[in-house]
Amino acid sequence: MNKVNVAIIGCGGIATGKHLPSLSKIEQVEIIGFFDIFPASAQKAAEKFGAPGARVYDDYRELLADPTIDVVHICTPNDTHAEISIAALEAGKHVMCEKPMAKTAADGRRMVEAAKRTGKKLTIGYNNRFRADSQHLKRVIEDGDLGDIYFAKAHAVRRRGVPTWGVFLDEEKQGGGPLIDIGTHALDLTLWLMNNYEPKVVLGTAYHKLSRKENAANSWGPWDPEKFKVEDSAFAMIVMKNGATIMVEASWALNTLDTKEAKCTLCGTEGGADMQDGLRINGEKHSRLYVNQMQFEAKGADFYEGKKETMQDKEIRLWINAIINDTEPVVTPEQSCVVSEILEAIYESNRTGKAVYFD
């Protein structure tokens, strides 16, 4: 396959800000199909990013029936991810679905089964794996520099960063708030770096505290407490089957100055790492403690304008390469499904006040 025809379902901010710009940079890609529940959004995206003759569809099912489309990118609310992804796979399309994989773990498992059944590729948009610091840390870990990683923290903390547009505050459509929105990135990154996908037990809490405040300070303007149906913060402890412990912290609104988003802290038998101020590796050598600060933004001559690939560009490029070369995507559906299972267990633990055990 030398040319890949791509279609977009959902032409909102995540499509026009991430997927479409990155896809448009790849020579082998032609973006030929667009659908959105708001036709004007699809038309606008098609005019800006579409190949000659690109089509705007009235129904996503009509788009999926088009045999000229090879790949579908799904950028819709969480509660539609499974339905559209499974329909696309069954229509013979490869699928990239935005994070989280699905609103529920059961839907995530259905997506995994559909990919296996159809033989089509499925990946989820966990783009933070493709950051320069994440990629470097992965190599450090694979070289054994951290040893056995037995304690970790997944950070997704905003002081006041509540998204007040779209359906972010709608629990029915999204399945939750900051935990499923940004916590999912931090958890995916942590599990991937540890290469550990076997949870044993989860204990979690979620809070509706600051969400009840009116006229609150917020990066995107005050929220309406009546419409704030999801948690404003959530926390969890996960114990893996090999005994490793992972702490998760996620918030859109929290009275803290210790803010980190899509970051992690790792502690192993040979060394540790954190993403507090860039990437730092710590350990002990010749009976002395050390800290190595990694630099990723090298400065060159003032007149040189070098090429810089963003994490989103790299994510999309490697995804398209996996299709062209028939290789496994970097983010597998099985890995993403475990993330969804853990997120759901955190919410369940909060509802019941009990730990949730995995078989």
Image (tube, rainbow, N blue to C red):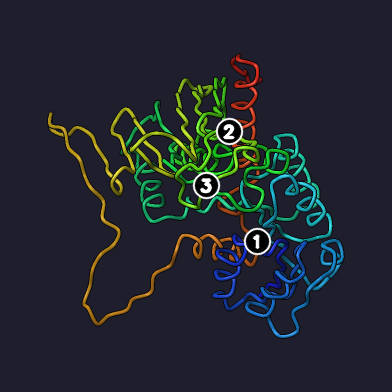
Task: Say whether disc 1 or disc 2 marks the residue closer to the N-terminus.
Answer: 2
Camera-nearest residue between 9 and 115: 9
Residue 132 image position (x, y, % from top left): 38, 56
Q: Residue at x 64, y 67 (%)?
A: 324
Residue type at tag 1: Asp
Residue ID for mark 1? 326
The image quadrant that residue 266 belongs to is: top left
Helix, strand or loop at disc 2? loop
Q: Is residue 257 left or right of residue 127?
A: left
The residue singled out by tag 2 in the image is 231
The reply to whether discs 3 and 1 touch (Cβ–Cβ < 8 Å) is no
The quadrant of the picture occupied by the C terminus is: top right
Distance from Cα at disc 1 to Cα at disc 2: 40 Å
Which of the two residues, 282 or 352, is positioned nearer the viewer here?
Answer: 352
SS type, badge 3: loop
Mark 2 or mark 3: which comes first in sequence? 3
- Of tags 3 and 1, the one toward the viewer is 3
**Front tag of 2 and 3:** 3
What crowding class fits label 3: few (fewer than 14 Cα within 10 Å), some (14-19), or many (20 or more)?
some
Residue 210 at x, y = what percent? 50, 33
How far across and how far down the image is residue 160, in percent? 44, 43
- Amino acid type, label 3: Pro
Q: Nearer the viewer, mark 1 or mark 2?
A: 2
Residues tagged 2 and 3 counted as in contact (Cβ below 8 A):
no
CA gap, disc 2 and disc 3: 16 Å
User: Closer to the camera, 192 or 12?
Assistant: 12
Marks 1 & 2, CB-CB < 8 Å contact = no
Q: CA distance from mark 3 to mark 1?
A: 47 Å
Q: Is residue 311 above or below residue 199?
A: below
Locate residue 228: give its quadrant.
Answer: top right
Q: Amino acid at mark 2?
A: Glu
Residue where numbered disc 3 is placed: 222
